[in-house]
Image (spheres, rainbow, N blue to C red):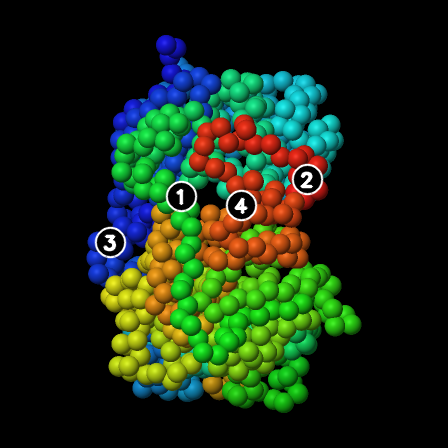
């Protein structure tokens, strides 16, 4: 009754009432700024690095923060600051590629399954459920052990691990939207499945799907770091942030900055993505409501 | 004269919207309720009737706030009290019967435990005594199996029974005032009678005062002593039920009453056609159902051998109670739910049962409009895009031509062209339903299936939509299949009527003579159960109890 009252007044007083806009709050803006910062670093990092990331530049190992080495040096005396700048390219790049692939595939398959229903839905859902039962790190271990570690293999492995979740999520949302009258109207008009999925259903699940994408990105960064920590991720002398933590783990007892700063980098990226996703502009978030 | 039980003075309630704007919902309302008197609050959605009713318990919905004025119940000032003191009064002094009893009961607890909960919370009486009292109330409310019904779970009783049980829940603490919030709106007409009778006799016997919130004047006429007409948070008129119904003073009250009067439908004069015209829709032996299909028949069969004809330019009404298969019939005709037997012939061409197998040209001829206007419009698309799609889809219109046609369609349903940049969420209920009609018209159909299209709208708005339908019919030569549970709307627009009961057509007859010539007992029961604008109607109504028991599955 309240809502009815408001909409009628809103409809009367202006030609175009100010609907949900693109602006969003400060928490979201800070998150976006940090994300953009890391994205930029991934692009131009190698040129900014004060020292060659793979070279031993300090005679001491686990060196402290100093004017020359802003974030100290690692277990071989390499500059951590330069290595983090370089690692951003691997971490952000691989995670972004994997999450895009996983969510695109998962959401498209999920929507098709919801609209088509029947045996297609049943077979696909059970298959992906079964796949979901395999522990993610174990699956990564086996694949990398079998075919060796390279960047494409890492991306595809992470995609395979996270696609079923994205599928389940999108399918659950799409099944709800699929029963709405406006989808029935479109179907009664004779629209194709493709139109139903892209025009009627997708815009209405976009908000939650983006939130899911952000969450999945964070998980992928963490699993990638985990794989690298086990020595199965990016191979030396290159290293992503997880690899940096692993290399320098002995420095933990010495209080070396070499292990702290890569951890901070991982934390800042994952937290900022969540901050942004939780505070998306209302224009995207409230579409489904 | 005795002191009033409830005194409301200069009540103002405001709310803050999501965008931070302040809105005044109730703008200074004064009224009194005497002990034992039933007062009805009547008005459209948005008039503030529920907000006022809830404020009598000192409660407001989230976001709303009582900003001024006083509410006194007996000796207590509800507005000045602490929350804890108010909570002590709820259930013992004032209690509440919600619109949806199904949503008000916890499905995982037995009914008896929930009915006597008020007695337990306020420690009014020991459990055994409370249960005894509950059973007495069940009897007073004419519930069947009064001794054992409390042992059932909410899903094991019917909707009308559940509504009476929720009244028992409200009455167990011997309140002085009971608030009824549209308690019969969701019920079928035949069930409504039973529920209203039960409410009335219990309230009279206990001398309890009541506030009855409703949008339906005819229902209110049966139960209220006085009526308060509300609009936009202000009182338009207060008066005795007889006076409001027979001699309204306020213009808005007159408008409400006028919207209620059925205007008999005048059939369109058809120009004499040279050839014998084919019926626009012919349905024969249609059978449809839901569930897994075995041996070509679905598990749950809903429609059983439905046959009818709609001649060009004429309108067919389909009436029946919930569960009678009215909507299923529309879905089967449209092909949304493929029929497993029988056929649908549109304009001489037999349609395939499943809409997937029908051609674009076949689909275009028959369009459907749904009951809930807002779920039928994609919230992510603008009105312009929603109307443009069928134009592109059926006729391949693009650019300027399509834009012009969208404006034309909006004009046909009396909406301004500027509306096409809006999203559905920014429109009112009536406007949304007009957009739905415009979308159906975009396909240039010959037949429109209207599934309860006015049921979710306010009386005045619904009357305007019916006017629009008639106007469009005379301009475009359409035919409507009009599904409704509301007999007066059917009378207002239809030439012929089908009465449905449990998936079968029990009777087909002309709409104009529906009330006088119905012969099937079920149609007679249904027609006699529609409340009339007459305070003595319920008391004077006599129905054969055997007939009621036979057809109303309560």
Tag 4–tag 3 contact (CB < 8 Å): no
Secondary structure of the residue carrying numbered label 1: loop
Same-chain status of marks 2 and 1: yes
Look at the picture and state if B245 lies above or below B523.
above
The residue depicted at 28 percent of the width and 71 percent of the height is: B407
Tell me the residue that label 1 is attached to: B261
Tell me the residue that label 2 is attached to: B547
10 Å crowding of disc 4: few (<14), some (14-19), many (20+): some
Look at the picture and state if B550 lies above or below B209.
below
- The chain holding disc 2 is B
The residue depicted at 53 percent of the width and 23 percent of the height is: B203
Tell me the residue that label 4 is attached to: B515
10 Å crowding of disc 3: few (<14), some (14-19), many (20+): few
Label 4 and label 3: CA atoms lie apart by 41 Å
Secondary structure of the residue carrying numbered label 3: helix
Q: Which mark is residue B317?
A: none
Name the front one of labels 4 and 1: 4
Camera sees residue B13? no
Label 3 and label 1: CA atoms lie apart by 29 Å
Tell me the residue that label 3 is attached to: A12
Label 2 and label 3: CA atoms lie apart by 50 Å
């Amino acid at each position: 009754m309240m809502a009815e009252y408001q909409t009628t007044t809103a409809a009367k007083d202006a030609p175009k009432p100010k609907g949900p806009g693109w602006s969003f709050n400060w928490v979201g803006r800070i998150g976006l700024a940090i994300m953009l910062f890391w994205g930029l670093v991934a692009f131009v990092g190698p040129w900014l690095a004060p020292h060659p990331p793979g070279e031993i530049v300090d005679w001491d190992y686990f060196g402290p923060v100093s004017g020359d080495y802003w974030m100290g040096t690692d277990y071989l005396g390499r500059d951590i600051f330069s290595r983090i700048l370089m690692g951003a390219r691997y971490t952000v790049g691989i995670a972004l590629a994997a999450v895009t692939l996983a969510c695109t595939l998962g959401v498209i398959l999920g929507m098709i399954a919801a609209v088509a229903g029947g045996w297609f839905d049943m077979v696909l859902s059970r298959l992906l459920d079964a796949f979901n039962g395999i522990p993610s790190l174990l699956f990564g271990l086996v694949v990398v052990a079998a075919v060796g570690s390279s960047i494409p293999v890492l991306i595809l492995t992470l995609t395979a691990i996270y696609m079923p979740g994205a599928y389940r999520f999108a399918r659950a949302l799409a099944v709800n939207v699929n029963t709405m009258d406006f989808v029935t109207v479109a179907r009664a008009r004779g629209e194709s499945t493709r139109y139903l999925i892209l025009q009627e259903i997708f815009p209405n699940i976009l908000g939650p799907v983006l939130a899911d994408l952000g969450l999945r990105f964070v998980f992928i960064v963490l699993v990638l770091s985990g794989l690298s920590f086990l020595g199965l991720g990016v191979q030396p002398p290159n290293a992503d942030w997880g690899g940096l933590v692993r290399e320098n783990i002995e420095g933990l007892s010495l209080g070396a900055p070499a292990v702290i700063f890569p951890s901070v980098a991982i934390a800042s990226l994952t937290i900022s993505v969540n901050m942004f996703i939780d505070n998306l502009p209302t224009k995207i978030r409230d579409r489904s409501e | 004269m005795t002191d009033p039980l409830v005194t409301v003075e200069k009540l103002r309630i405001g709310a803050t919207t999501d965008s931070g704007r302040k809105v005044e919902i109730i703008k200074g309302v004064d009224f009194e309720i005497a002990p034992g008197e039933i007062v009805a609050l009547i008005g459209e959605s948005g008039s503030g009737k529920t907000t006022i009713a809830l404020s009598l318990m000192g409660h407001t919905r989230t976001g709303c706030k009582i900003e001024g004025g006083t509410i006194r119940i007996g000796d207590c000032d509800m507005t000045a009290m602490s929350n804890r003191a108010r909570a002590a009064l709820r259930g013992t002094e004032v209690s509440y019967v919600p619109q949806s009893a199904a949503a008000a009961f916890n499905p995982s607890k037995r009914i008896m435990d929930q009915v006597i909960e008020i007695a337990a919370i306020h420690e009014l009486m020991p459990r055994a005594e409370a249960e005894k009292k509950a059973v007495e109330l069940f009897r007073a409310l004419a519930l069947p199996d009064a001794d054992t019904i409390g042992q059932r779970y909410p899903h094991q009783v019917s909707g009308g029974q559940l509504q009476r049980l929720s009244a028992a829940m409200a009455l167990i603490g011997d309140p002085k005032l009971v608030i009824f919030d549209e308690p019969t709106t969701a019920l079928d007409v035949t069930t409504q009678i039973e529920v209203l009778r039960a409410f009335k006799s219990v309230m009279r016997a206990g001398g309890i005062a009541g506030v009855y919130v409703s949008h339906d004047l005819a229902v209110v006429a049966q139960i209220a002593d006085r009526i308060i007409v509300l609009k936009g948070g202000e009182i338009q008129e207060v008066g005795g039920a007889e006076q409001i119904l027979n001699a309204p003073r306020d213009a808005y009250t007159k408008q409400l009453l006028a919207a209620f009067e059925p205007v008999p439908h005048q059939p369109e004069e058809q120009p004499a056609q040279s050839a014998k015209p084919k019926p626009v829709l012919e349905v024969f032996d249609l059978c449809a159902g839901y569930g897994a299909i075995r041996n070509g028949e679905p598990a749950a069969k809903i429609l059983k051998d439905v046959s009818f004809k709609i001649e060009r330019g004429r309108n067919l009404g389909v009436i029946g109670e919930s569960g009678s298969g009215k909507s299923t019939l529309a879905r089967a005709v449209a092909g949304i739910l493929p029929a497993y037997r029988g056929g649908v012939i549109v304009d001489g061409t037999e349609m395939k049962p499943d809409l997937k197998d029908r051609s674009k040209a076949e689909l275009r001829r028959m369009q459907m409009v749904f009951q809930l206007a807002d779920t039928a419009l994609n919230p992510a698309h603008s009105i312009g895009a929603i109307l443009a799609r069928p134009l592109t889809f059926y006729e391949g219109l693009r650019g300027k031509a399509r834009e012009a046609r969208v404006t034309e369609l909006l004009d046909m349903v009396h909406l301004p062209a500027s509306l096409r940049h809006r999203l559905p969420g920014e429109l009112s209920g009536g406007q949304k339903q007009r957009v739905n009609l415009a979308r159906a018209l975009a396909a240039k159909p010959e037949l429109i299936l209207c599934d309860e299209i006015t049921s979710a709208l306010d009386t005045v708005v619904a009357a305007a939509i019916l006017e629009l339908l008639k106007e469009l019919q005379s301009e475009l030569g359409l035919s409507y299949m009009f599904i409704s549970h509301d007999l007066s709307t059917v009378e207002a627009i239809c030439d012929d009527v089908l009465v449905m009961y449990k998936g079968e057509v029990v009777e087909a007859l002309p709409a104009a003579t529906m009330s006088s010539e119905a012969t099937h007992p079920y149609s007679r029961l249904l027609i006699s159960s529609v409340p009339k604008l007459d305070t003595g109607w319920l008391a004077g109504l006599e129905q054969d109890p055997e007939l009621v028991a036979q057809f109303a599955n309560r």
